Amino acid sequence: MQIKEKTRIGYYPGCAITMGSSSEEYGTSVLRVAEAIGPELEEIHDWNCCGASSAHATNHKLSTALSIRNISLAEQSGFKEILAPCPMCSQRLIISQKDVADDEELKKDVEDAIEMPCNGDVKILNYLELIKNYCMDEIAEKRKKTPKDLKIASYYGCLLLRPPKVLQFDDPENPTSMEEIVEATGAISVDWELKTNCCGGGFTLSRTDIVLKLTNDILECAVDAGADAIAVACPMCHANLDMRQKKIEKEYNRKFNIPIVYISELIGLALDLGPISLGLNKHFIDTESVVNAFA
Amino acid sequence: MIEALRKKAEELLRSNTVDVIYGYGEGSTPERTRPVFITKPEDVNKLIWNKYCVYNLTTYLKRQESRKLGKPAIVVKGCDAKTIVVLIKESQIKREDVYILGVTCNGVGEPLATKCKACDVNTPRIYDDLIGEKIENKEIPFDERYAELDEYEKLSEKEKWDFWQKQFAKCIKCYACSSICPLCFCDRCIVDKNQPQWIDPSAHPRGNLSWNVTRAYHLAGRCINCEECQRVCPADIPLNLLNKKLAKETEKNFNYRSGYNIDDELAMATYKEDDNQDFIK
Amino acid sequence: MGKKIGVFVCHCGTNISATVDVEKVAEETKKNNPGVSYTTTYKYMCSDPGQKLLRDKIKEEGLTGVVIAACSPKMHEHTFRNAAIKSGLNPYHVEISNIREQCSWVHPDKPVGTEKSTDLVRMMTEKVRKDKSLKPIKVHVTKRALIIGGGIAGIQAALDIADGGHEVIMVEREASIGGHMAQLSETFPTLDCSQCIMTPKMVEAAQHDNITMHTWSEIESITGYLGNFDVKIRKKARSVDLDLCTGCSSCWQVCPCKKIKSEFDMGLANRTAIYIPFPQAIPSKPVIDRENCILFKDARKKNIKPNDSKVCRKCIDACPIAPVKAIDYNQEDEIIDVKVGAIIVATGFRELEDGLYGEYGGGKYEDVITGMQFERLASASGPTDGKIKRPSDGKEPEIVVFIQCVGSRDPSKGCSYCSKTCCMYTAKHTMLYKHKVHHGHAFVFYIDIRCAGKGYEEFSQRAIEEEGATYLRGRVSRVYKKGDKLIVLGADTLTGSVVEIEADMVVLASAMKAQDDAEQFAQKLSIQYDKDKFFSEMHPKLKPVESSSAGIFLAGTCQGPKDIPETVAQAGAAASKVLALLSSDELEREPVVARVDRQLPPVFSTCIGCFYCQKVCPYSAIESEDIKARDGSVIKTVARVNEGLCQGCGLCAATCRSKSIELDGFNDEQIYAEINAVEFN
Amino acid sequence: MAEETKFEPKIVAFLCNWCTYAGADLAGTGRNQYQANVRVIKLPCTGGIDPLFLIKAFERGADGILVSGCHPGDCHYNSGNYHARRRWNVFRPLLEFCGINPERIQFSWISAAEGGKWVETINGVVDTVRALGPFEGYQKINTIGPDASSESSQT
Amino acid sequence: MEKTLKKENFNSLITGLKDQGYRTIAPKKDNNLVTLDEVQSADEIHLDHVQTNNSIKEYFLPKTEKILSYTLEKNKVSIEEPEGFAVKSVVFGSRPCDAASLPIMDKVFNWDCSDKFWVERREAITIVTIACDKCDNYCFCTSVGLAPDSKEGSDVLLTKISDDEYLVETVTEKGEGLIKGLETVFSDPVAGTPDRQVASVEKKFEIDKIKPWLDENFAHKIWAEFSMKCISCGACTFVCPTCHCFDIVDECTMSKGDRVKNWDGCQFKMFTLHTSGHNPRSTQDQRWRQRIMHKFKYYVEKFDNILCVGCGRCSRVCPADMNISEMLEIIATEENQKE
């Protein structure tokens, strides 16, 4: 559904993609796209960690309180919706909202902890949802560049879709929202099998061998399907596919050299925003081929 | 208004669409009107209409004497018209057997009857002809329609019991309340069944309690609040409070208002899977 | 008429007399209760001598009413009422006071128990004074049975009833009888081919002169009651005249439309527009698929009568029957009215639709097939003549992965139950596969192997030990296509390792689900169904083949997943119930039914015709009756109870405001007498 | 009868034959005891219980009434308990409106397998009504009113 | 010599009566309903009304009355007669028409057997009537041979002579005895003839014309036309001081029971229903005719009294405004007489 006038949406960057963090290029590209075609994003004042990292594994109440505090802050500044581009944050926020709604006692404890009421009727959006809800027409209208037969494999990973009962976003087994956005930018979507397979996620440090195996399968499948690049919407996926690619090539002595781009960067290129401003220079695998396709 | 009514009545009688007009005529005193049954066109000027026409004429649809006069045209206010809807749903009459002469009404009775204070049927919701220009029916919220009950519901259990024992003690079992009620149409009423005698016929407190409770209960989900029972009671017992209480419970629990919709199922003849059951352990 | 009531207080060994002074109860009753002329106590009233005592006393004392103060009526009401019948007393003058389960066993204090027992006996003596003689209701029984569904259950039941000498009407929705069993290749545990054991039965049913078979037909409506069901059968237009056609196959050989997916072959092969589902079809006469036949499409487009269309017409031209062709495009649906005494529902099951499992390719990959499709592959009359070939490229699969519990035991996919047959048929599939592809290898992912039938465990062990199938205990998380291989990602919980198999073909042991239209069908017959839309049996242990409606019985998978032996056993059981029902000309029914007041003119009835009773009756057992004057004019319209349909719940009696309708056995006077006898003040 | 010190409430129970009556039997076979104040009247279905029965039971001196039958959905006659529930939904507030304490009439769903629940429910009803005391209001009017002429409208 | 009764002495009158063991019954107002009811003090008495809602009949033939009670053993019945139903009382402030009904009813209650419930109450209750100083157009006592100040049936007649004083005229020794017993309460009349404030009730019809018409017109069409609006309830017969029909019913539990006499009325459709189902008076016109015939023909033939005192209660209380005086006027009018 397209909302014409500029609506104010709370922007919750989270630790991974805020300025100066390891995946800041995702954050900057999101902001650049928003400046170009809206909607108006306003960073939530005094936001704190969403509790996704180790917190939710060790202390459930702490991680819930951390998330709910962000939501209450947003509520107080009048936001009806919050964008959390990083799926780890959006998943944590949604699950906390549900936990508090289901457990009266937890809600009381959390409210005491953060000294703020939380009535939890703010909607948490992930980046794909935001684009589909607000920007599909804008991209079509404002697109300046059309890439020459740039074949993109859309990779969703897990946190955007699972657990399906709680997140209720797209079809958890066979999602299509990212493909629609890719096609809106003029690129060609490639049909491949492992777009919802796990990339090894949190084991990136503790069990790198598993990450390499899983990520190798994903890269192999994308390349076999003829993709020129893989689009992602999650800093963790990007880290494992982009940063680890060289090591995988060494481990499985295969040549991939397939660039991993954020979907926001892809949209940025289609809107002819400068590659540097989109952070395309900060990738391990050179994104030269993608930038040229838009030339 | 009265000329239009008489002209219409004459026209109906001359064209033989109906055989008799149930209408209001002059009463013993100016403040009273009485039912009249016009069969000849030249008698139509006996028909009158004023704020004393409180009578619910549909009660004559249940009486064999009046039905022998043939197909009737009934002068009905909005509240009376609701009775016809219930009578049709309970297969006592067919829609085509009665010609409904709806009259727009801004309230009857001197002082104004309580039912008219929260009236949402100034214009009858079912009629063949309408006398008087249409008045927009108001949407009266739930609480306002049952405001009369609040005062009694607030009483303590003892106060309620004493209040009603005092009222029921006055009952002389003349059965004017069930004779006037258009929906009390059972030829042999339960109170007349003596094998076994469920309700004691004597007018002592026990017999009066079981009669008044049963009469009210048998109108649950049916009574259309025309307040005739209360008007005709020689002992001046506020009988309509019982019916109104049942109407309130029926609407609250089953979202059903009697006499407003000819298609939906009668409240006490059906059920819903999710009917309220919080009082059932 | 004063009643002479006999009261028999039972000791029940010491069960009652331990905490109730039975002598005192008898004495108090004789002293106080009006109408009581004889009282006694006895050690075991339900014993033979006890019943003999009852029978003798009824005759000797000339008793016209009996109260037995003993155990719950649920135990021996029937026994004592039969004893009364034997001694000439109408059984409905016998009432039971429950002074054991609801008094002596639960109130240890003897005086309290005795006083309560006296009250309970008094309540029943008062009720007996108001009891009326009731004669069992005789209901005419139509000596004909209806079997809905032509699978093995329907055929077996039809044969049993027909052999029992009664007429059977069988209705089958598809073009031929045979049901799902006809689609199977070999059947466990004996591996004998399903066609060989079933076709003779199908032929026998077709040729049995007591059985009338309506294929390509559906049930339009069923009304009536036990012994008197009025059934409307809709014979869908076949476009082929069954009498004329000889099944010579000239027509379906020339039919140009060859690309229609065959339902019988589960979409693995195609069929023509005019077709017989499978070679051994009974009747072996074709039917025209009006959806896909180009002549009918053309007629619909031009909105003309089918026979007027000049398009194609190859089949009618090829038809050798003369002078009138066996094919008739203008044939219409036909409604047949039939009266039957009993009905057996054998409508079978539906396999879980494969689209439900996105993780396994959700119907995208051709080589991921269901159990039934594998049956077709393995069947000699199947699309591949029994050779195991991959549907995608026809290659013989080297590695086949079988996945158990696809849909079953999975509440998130909507069926939490176990489909009972998949463990066995998957083991069978591995054997069939190994017999036909010796060098091939079969993997089976399972949760638990459930082979509990006779010879079942040995059968599945054989699949593992002799046939060499590899059973991996674990779930499969994902199946995806890689090149021309299917990558199966699963777990082997016994070794705790992740398993990845590059398979050529994957067979899903899909769940057994209720038919799509099971709910509407159950409502049409007003029988109850459970949360999974399988029809509910009257009592899981004691009445497995009776449905909730009297006269309607269940057989086969429509009542829940089961294998062929169990289905045939149920079919036989249902048939025996029907035979018992049809064995007598008239059926006696418990006379506890409602009755609307009737009186002499001029009153005729106190019923005023508001028909609240009709609206609340769960069995629509109440009809309206016009009481007419001699000149035919209607005096009044009142309610009337159809004794056959009325099940005696009493809803109408409690709803009737003027109490003009009463339930025999629990009429107003009896209930009033019981309340009156409670005697607190 | 000797003047009892403790008021023993008198309870009449209208039970549906298929479920609660069988439940009560089960409590019997299980030998779990309960107070003996109740007198049970068996009817085919709760749908067959007319509110008139309740009034007559009070007129015959009952202090409390229990009406119990199958859980919704279990009714042997499909919809008996649904219709019964609908009646009680309006009859109970009517009696309350007339000053009869609703605790004196209790409703419950007890299946044939819930012997324990039957014992709990019955003991609950007896204890509640014992707390309420005898139903003086009704007992006062259960005697035939003193001949009307002396006080035609009692205060 | 006549006496007067001042209003301010009402209290002392009542206390005086109470001392002598009398129960006092007087008109009492309860929101808009005036009824004859037991009073303890004078300020409960309400006098500025035309007619009480319930009639005096209620104190002689109560709406419900236990005439005997019995206990049942298996083969023995013990019966117990009620006592103390006749309570020594004074009805203060009844109207002349009500009082006049008593002698009329005495006849039927002492006809083939004397009804002890009626007779004993008649002796126990003294009637102090207050003449009507106002009436409404339902009153027609003058048309049935009575008057707003007639003395029939009263023991003492009070007539209003000023706002707070009533002229006392004793009618019977019983009244004489009552007055003598309470000397102090009454005061001597002031000189000069007191102007008695008595309502003037306009005569509606000639009573002598009624019976002759009734003798001839059993099947007249007026019965149906006039009674079309009647709804067959029992209100008119129950409030009428001269209607005396009653029904007897046994109300019992298993061990004991009471035989109860209740009011009944000929206007109920079940009144004449036979067990066979036949009903000689099944339609309302037959029942309405019965009401008029019984009051103005049958009772006259049997007891030489009109069974109506013209109090007008039946017309006031009738839901359908069936005015009995209007009916009698129609009967008495000329053109009807001719037919």
Image (tube, rainbow, N blue to C red):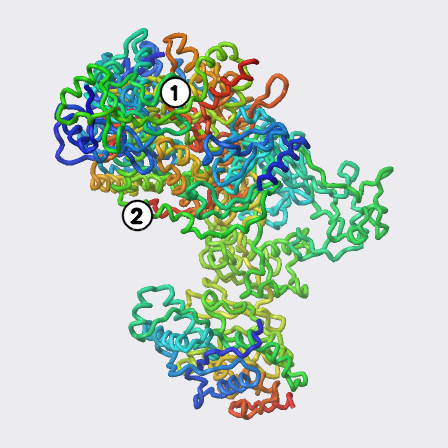
Nearer to the camera, E312 or C86: E312
Image height check: is A227 above or below C134? below
State the image quarter where residue B248 is shown. Answer: top left
From the image, tell me which residue sits under label 2.
B154
From the image, tell me which residue sits under label 1.
E142
| Residue found 59% across the figure and 21% down from its top | C628
Q: Position of E109 compared to B78: left or right?
A: left
Nearer to the camera, C458 or C44: C44
Amino acid type shown at disc 1: Thr
Separation of residues labelled 2 and 1 (CA atoms) = 51 Å
Image height check: is C387 above or below C141? below
Residue E206 on image: x %, y %: 45, 16
Disc sitting over residue C379 in the figure? none
Image height check: is D87 above or below E288? below
Badge 1 element: helix
Amino acid type shown at disc 2: Lys
Can residue C671 be seen here? The reply is no
